[in-house]
Image: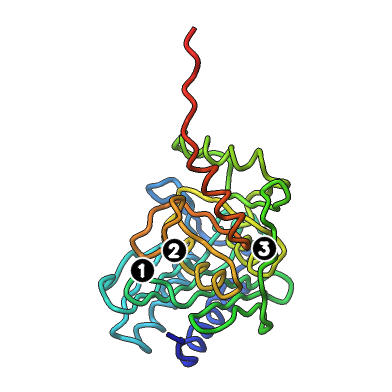
């Protein structure tokens, strides 16, 4: 299925609307509160999501919406938009420009359109991926690079630490084997893989709004992103993802993540 260009243009208008707010409010005073999961949220996260929800409801009243800040509205609909108004809220609060807006459209639970938008990086950077179309970065077609060996890979991770020790140990196995490891790139890491500047990203503890937009972006550039078992990502996916530009590298990372734990020696 090739996605209708009208829908792609509408998604770009959503990103334009988000970017207009974020550029205006970046590095300005704003209220900050702490959510029950102890993560920060700003009034700007809420303002952006409210604006995007209103635009979607006006243009596609039969579509569902799932957003990080305001939850799910008709998640059982055939078409569901999944929104993260500010992916990297901590970066936004700290004045670091790697945060972005993530916009995904899912059909029957599977992402068919994704936008990764970074409105304050230079003059703005945007990746757009859609089923049946090549991925674009600021209007130009991009493609992943070949890198089959973990030892040669440039790898991103959100953090080496997890509330689940088994996730931390699995991540550490790949981290120790990788050629170069960088942290806290927010959703920028997925765009860099799609454009052939990085090779691998392994994350855990995410919500679906953190990664579904990356699926069409990476797939349209020749890359792959799955959960840690290698299953495709959908609205029903769990919280751990691995993205790679090279499928051989992806298989190697999955194998290392799945290695059985070594029992400690008994005295």
Query: Which of the two labelled residues, at mark 3 and mark 2, occupies the earlier sequence position?
Result: 3
| Residue at numbered disc 2 | 209
Q: Nearer the viewer, mark 1 or mark 3?
A: 1
Percent x, y of residue 113: 47, 77
Closer to the camera in the image, 15 or 248: 248
Closer to the camera in the image, 239 or 84: 239
Percent x, y of residue 173: 58, 38
Distance from label 1 to label 2 (Cα)? 8 Å
In the visual, does 33 lie left or right of 147? left
Q: Is residue 40 above or below residue 138?
A: above
Q: Nearer the viewer, mark 3 or mark 2?
A: 2
Q: Are marks 1 and 3 in contact (CB under 8 Å)?
A: no
Percent x, y of residue 137: 66, 77
Q: Residue at x 66, y 51 (%)?
A: 155
Q: Is residue 27 above or below residue 56?
A: above
| Residue at numbered disc 1 | 66
Kind of element beneath mark 3:
loop
Classed neighbour count for the residue bearing mark 3: other residues with Cα under 10 Å, few (<14), some (14–19), many (≥20): many
Q: Are marks 1 and 2 in contact (CB under 8 Å)?
A: yes
Tell me where residue 127 sits by quadrant: bottom right
Kind of element beneath mark 1:
strand
Classed neighbour count for the residue bearing mark 2: other residues with Cα under 10 Å, few (<14), some (14–19), many (≥20): many
Q: Residue at x 45, y 37 (%)?
A: 163
**Mark sitting on residue 97:** 3
Q: Are marks 3 and 2 in contact (CB under 8 Å)?
A: no
Q: Is residue 125 above or below residue 162?
A: below
In the visual, does 151 lie left or right of 133? right
Query: Which of the two labelled residues, at mark 1 and mark 3, occupies the earlier sequence position?
Result: 1
């Amino acid at each position: 299925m090739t996605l209708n260009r009208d829908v792609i243009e509408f998604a770009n208008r959503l990103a334009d609307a988000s970017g207009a707010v974020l550029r205006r409010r970046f590095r300005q005073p704003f209220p900050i509160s702490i959510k029950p999961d102890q993560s920060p949220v700003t009034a700007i996260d809420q303002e952006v999501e409210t604006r995007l929800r209103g635009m979607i409801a006006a243009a596609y009243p039969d579509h569902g919406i799932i957003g990080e800040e305001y939850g799910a509205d008709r998640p059982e609909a055939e078409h569901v938009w999944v929104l993260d108004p500010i992916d990297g809220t901590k970066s936004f609060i700290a004045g670091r420009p790697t945060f972005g807006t993530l916009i995904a459209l899912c059909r029957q639970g599977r992402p068919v359109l994704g936008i990764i938008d970074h409105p304050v990086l230079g003059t703005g950077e945007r990746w757009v991926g859609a089923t049946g179309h090549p991925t674009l970065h600021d209007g130009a077609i991009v493609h992943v690079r070949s890198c089959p060996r973990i030892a040669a890979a440039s790898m991103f991770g959100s953090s080496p630490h997890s509330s689940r020790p088994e996730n931390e140990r699995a991540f550490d196995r790949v981290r120790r084997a990788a050629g170069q490891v960088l942290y806290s790139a927010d959703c920028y890491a997925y765009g860099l893989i799609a454009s052939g500047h990085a090779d691998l990203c392994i994350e855990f503890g995410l919500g679906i709004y953190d990664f579904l937009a990356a699926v069409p972006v990476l797939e349209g550039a020749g890359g792959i992103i799955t959960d840690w078992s290698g299953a495709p990502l959908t609205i029903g996916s769990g919280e751990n993802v691995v993205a790679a530009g090279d499928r051989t590298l992806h298989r190697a990372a999955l194998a290392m993540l799945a290695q059985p734990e070594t029992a400690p020696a008994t005295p």
